[in-house]
Amino acid sequence: MTTNKKVLDFIEQSKTLCQPDEIVWIDGSEEQLDALRAQAVKEKVLIKLNQEKLPGCYLHRTTVNDVARVEGRTFICSKNKDDSAPINNWMETSKAFELLNGLFKGVMKGRTMYVIPYSMGAVGSKFSKIGIELTDSIYVVLNMAIMTRVGKKVMDALGDGDFVKGLHSYAELSEEKRYICHFPEENTIMSINSNYGGNVLLGKKCFALRIASYLGKTEGWMAEHMLILGIENPKGEIKYVAAAFPSACGKTNLAMLIPPEIYKKKGYKVWCVGDDIAWIRVGEDGRLWAVNPENGFFGVAPGTNMKSNPNALLSTMKNTIFTNVVENLDDETVWWEGLDKNPPKNALDWKGNPWNGDMKDADGKPIKGAHPNSRFTAPAINCPCLSDKFEAPDGVPLSAIIFGGRRAKTAPLVYQSKGWDNGVFVGSIMASETTAAATGAVGVVRRDPMAMRPFVGYNMGDYFRHWIEMGKKIKNKPEIFNVNWFRTDDEGNFIWPGFGDNLRVLEWIINRCEGKVDAVETPIGYVPHAEDINIEGLNGVTKETIEDLLSIDVENWKKETEGIESFYKELGERVPEELYAELDALKKNLNK
Ligand code: OXD
Ligand code: MN
């Protein structure tokens, strides 16, 4: 399929190392993918679902020890420790290659090695990047064919150019020998002993965030853990925002938001460009432009339903691969906790054991059927609110960047930073508090700068420096905001309704970007006048509720500055002085 010598060498070297019986190029044709699906069903890698109700849909079960990203087994390898540490796990490049080459030796004997040429971003766009993933997993091939653009057209676009090398083998799925290793300095990813999405679909977190963040630093652009959405007003004008939230803060829900009734009636619409990753560049017009490099959604199934996120649910109705959800044996469909109130009576749980919705554990609690991190891999094209700019080679211009986290008391519903450097500071102090649902103590703050803690492919201080430097290149900067949908009352109940009503906050954000509304200056930034958040048609939320949501507890924030300072210290010497200056300014403001 190619005469690109670098590609041929990479395949030849990997063949010598892994010793597969056979090599198969993925050309991206429907015939080939169909044949692979049939083979996967025969080999019991996939289960074919009800083709009338869920055309083109399949179910996969992972092994029990392989159900999530493994941050403890994920490494950023570089020659110098400081170029990766202290937040990342570090391995020295040559040591890591030695270890992995040992593990990959002969690992594909008796198996086929698939060659997947894939493009992150529209094929042929000058902003897109190409990767080649070599894998022995049909599951990976079929998921990559949903999540990215694959096949011959990608090789044609590559010509004799450069690409990111990715080598994956599920090997023996051993937990002890599981490694997800990134070599940003060598444009290489090696992943072994897992077959779970985030660890093995190398285009996603591994390339589009970890390797790409490093490429962005060297080439002057940004790879961010952000959704991108467009808000269309009744005049038909569309403004785009990108937003970063830590995992499990509702990114996919916000990306596919359904406007509240009163907004719908007026003609507001929301368009989804992406739900997880944004590649951002400075355009010729001096604005920031963002593309979603992916081609599908790898979403969490539990909690997805016709109320929480109808667009996501509708996206999964065809050509989707479900992983670790419940299999309904009566009609060969799928189910998960939070889909509806009618769990199947005759089903298999995510492990493949007999299950029904009435089963209880020794404490009388319902036994879950789907894994809490069970997933759907759905083509973006299925999404009813997909933006018509989804394939636009230059992406969409950003009016605002939004950061957010899960904070019970500290952060107000929304505030605006005082310019770019202050906005970078706001992103750098992002945090979420652990909830009762997670293991460990409740209310423990985990700092997750720009939601990139697990995804920056280099030193975090250098990453902050890159943000500061980017600011100097952007003539028409977007405004930077922070939101918090998760403020609670004294009984621990969420005060803000969230979901579609978050559009009310986005509306204020857009109005601020356009200079249409003023705001109140506080020690942390600008917050809305309560009356500028539209509460029309919102039951139980009054102007007083909004005032409460926007209030800033100075004592709490003083404590917060101590937490920020110790986090910066933990990150080491490369944290830019500009950010320490922002911290000092905040402290002064709080003491005024
Ligand atoms: C994801 C994550 O799966 O951020 O997108 O964990
Ligand atoms: Mn994510």
Image: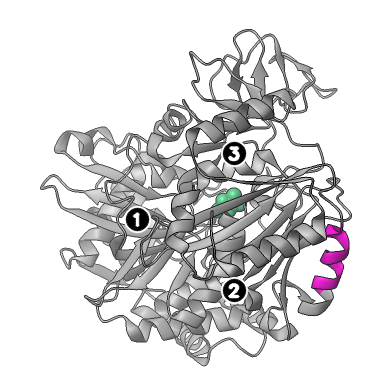
Mark whose residue sits in front, 1 or 3:
3
Give the SS element for disc 3. helix
The residue depicted at 84 percent of the width and 76 percent of the height is 95
Which numbered marker is on residue 170? Answer: none
> The disc labelled 2 sits on which kind of residue?
Lys
Whether tag 3 and tag 2 are in contact, CB under 8 A, the answer is no
Q: Which residues are magenta?
A: 96-105
Give the SS element for disc 1. helix
Question: Residue 134's quadrant in the figure?
Answer: bottom right
What secondary structure is the stretch in magenta mostly built from? helix
Badge count: 3
Which numbered marker is on residue 547? Answer: 1
Residue closer to the observer: 339 or 150:
150
Residue at the extreme left of the image, as rendered: 235
Give the SS element for disc 2. helix
Q: Is mark 1 within 8 Å of ligand 2?
A: no
> The disc labelled 3 sits on which kind of residue?
Leu
Q: Is residue 292 left or right of residue 211?
A: left
Residue 375 at x, y percent in the picture: 60, 37
Residue at the extreme front of the image, as rendered: 3
Write down the residue under mark 3.
142
Write down the residue under mark 2.
559
Work out whether mark 1 precedes mark 2 in sequence or the reverse, and give the earlier one: 1
**Spatial distance from mark 1 to mark 3, Cα to Cα?**
50 Å
